[in-house]
Amino acid sequence: MEEFDESSSAKKTKTIYVSTVISIALVLLMTGLLGLILIHAKNLSNYVKENIVLNIIVNEGSKEVDIIALQKSLENDPNVLKSQYVSKELAARNLTNDLGEDFVDFLGYNPLLSSIDVYLNAEYANNANIQTFSNQLSKNPLVKEVIYQKSLVDMVNQNIRLIGIVILAFAVTLLVIAVALINNTISLAIYSQRFLIKSMQLVGATKGFIRKPFVTYGIIHGMLAGLIAIILLLAALYLAQQQIPELVILRNWFEFSMVFIAVIGIGVLISGLSTYFAVNKYLRQKIYDLYR
Amino acid sequence: MIGNSVIKLEDVDVYQQKHLVLSNVNLHLDKEEFVFLIGQTGSGKSSLLKIIYGDLHITRGAGHVAGFDLTKLSDKDVPFLRRKLGIVFQDFQLLTDRSVEKNLEFVMKATGWKDQRLIDERIRDVLEKVGLRSKVKKMPHELSGGEQQRVVIARALLNDPEIILADEPTGNLDPGTSEEIVMLLRQISQYGTAVLMATHDYHIIRTFPSRIIKCENGIVHEDAKFV
């Protein structure tokens, strides 16, 4: 009977640690998922913004050399991501393909003008900037007009800001919940060790000596939980990309690894600190209080 | 410290949670003394012991224990005071998840022993003193109640304490085993370690006539007669 008790008490301690690590891992998984969603949302918004096209229509009869020189100067602008020269002929060919009918033949001449398609950097792509950009360009004698979808730019920017704020608020809330939950779980785990802590104090162990192994385990558990969370996050990423292959466009392993490092960091920090404070609580307590 | 006394309390008031439990306590204990501490449950015995091992602070009066001035005792000093005391309590049991040897080793590492050779030597010494040399590798649950209590006493002896505080050390033991434990504690006191033993066991008190300190009605009687 006694022997049974011994093994079950050791088992109980192990079970507490296993469930602590799992709880921390799950909370970290949620935090990590949100981090990944945030990164995907940011990359998606950048992707959309960088695909907003400014059509710079060039005056009739401009020399190709001048147009290409203008394109060169545009490409040197740090706010410009890329540009593409669309000649009159290319424009006609594109339109013919779209219409499925050779309109040049029908009209007898090509009414289209040459243009340069400009794609801007994501950080720069908002209406005010685009307005300044196009105003400056319009002063160029080569340029007839600059065309872009103002409403699209506005819509993209507004939606992205809103989604960003919502996700960020969600992330902060979740982080607070994570801290509270992990702290609670660890407090309970330490509570089960309170008599051991008292015993150590009774034999004359210093607080630091008693705390050290607990905090070390806290840090190891945080790390372990972080690793478990990362494995689950990788699985989630894999599954998501199976379902939505387009997500590959938004993939950025550097940013993902930043999330993974943050997950381990948060795990270690919260687990270590919570353990430290929980042990301290019992270190400060008088023996009398343990029985109340 | 004057002369041989290892515990000296003068006009101490003992508070437990703002309640005055004992007032004007005067108590002294010399080296090599073996003393019983008696009193009904709730008479303040445990609080008095807590003052001695630094779990309660002195608010009035003067107190010296094993060279420590209790009125100037800071939280940092408490562990070092306790290394001069051997504590044998009913609810301060052995760690059930490790062997006798590991139990003792744990206490030694916690109190600053580093050299493994000295640790092993000391463990052999204290187990020899309590007559359990052969049980080094046993787990606590493989020992009888009396043997477990002997290990607890061995643990209390590890740091060569000046005083052993024993709170009901025979509480869970049969009369025969109880006598053996008290005999062991008396023997220890004869080697120079003072022993203060709180007990309710009248049989033991009759069998081993010694000085009796009695807590009663908020007062400590230093030389109580046992009736």
Image (spheres, helix red, strand yellow):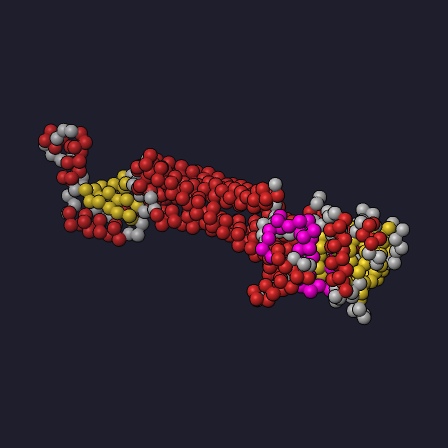
Magenta stretch, residue numbers = B136-165
- Against A282, residue A44 (above or below) is above
Residue B189 image position (x, y, % from top left): 76, 63
Choose between B46 and A94: the one closer to the eye. Answer: B46
**What residue is at 14 percent from the left and 29 percent from the top?**
A101
**What residue is at 72 percent from the left and 52 percent from the top?**
B89
Residue B37 image position (x, y, % from top left): 81, 54
Q: Quadrant of residue A90?
A: top left
Residue at the bottom extreme of this rendering: B3
Choose between B4 and A288: the one closer to the eye. Answer: B4
**What residue is at 15 percent from the left and 32 percent from the top?**
A96
- Against B59, residue A244 (above or below) is above
Residue A277 visible (yes or no): no
> What count of labels does the image hold?
0
Q: Quadrant of residue B60?
A: bottom right
Residue A262 image position (x, y, % from top left): 45, 49
Choose between B194 and A220: the one closer to the eye. Answer: B194
Choose between B8 and B39: the one closer to the eye. Answer: B39
Q: In which quadrant will I find the N terminus of chain A? A: top right
Drawn side of residue B100 relative to residue B36, left or right:
left
Q: Is residue A213 magenta?
A: no
Residue B151 visible (yes or no): yes
Residue A153 image position (x, y, % from top left): 34, 39
Q: In which quadrant will I find the C terminus of chain A? A: top right
Drawn side of residue A87 relative to residue A259, left or right:
left
Drawn side of residue A104 relative to residue B115, left or right:
left
**What residue is at 44 percent from the left and 45 percent from the top?**
A228
Q: Is residue B151 magenta?
A: yes
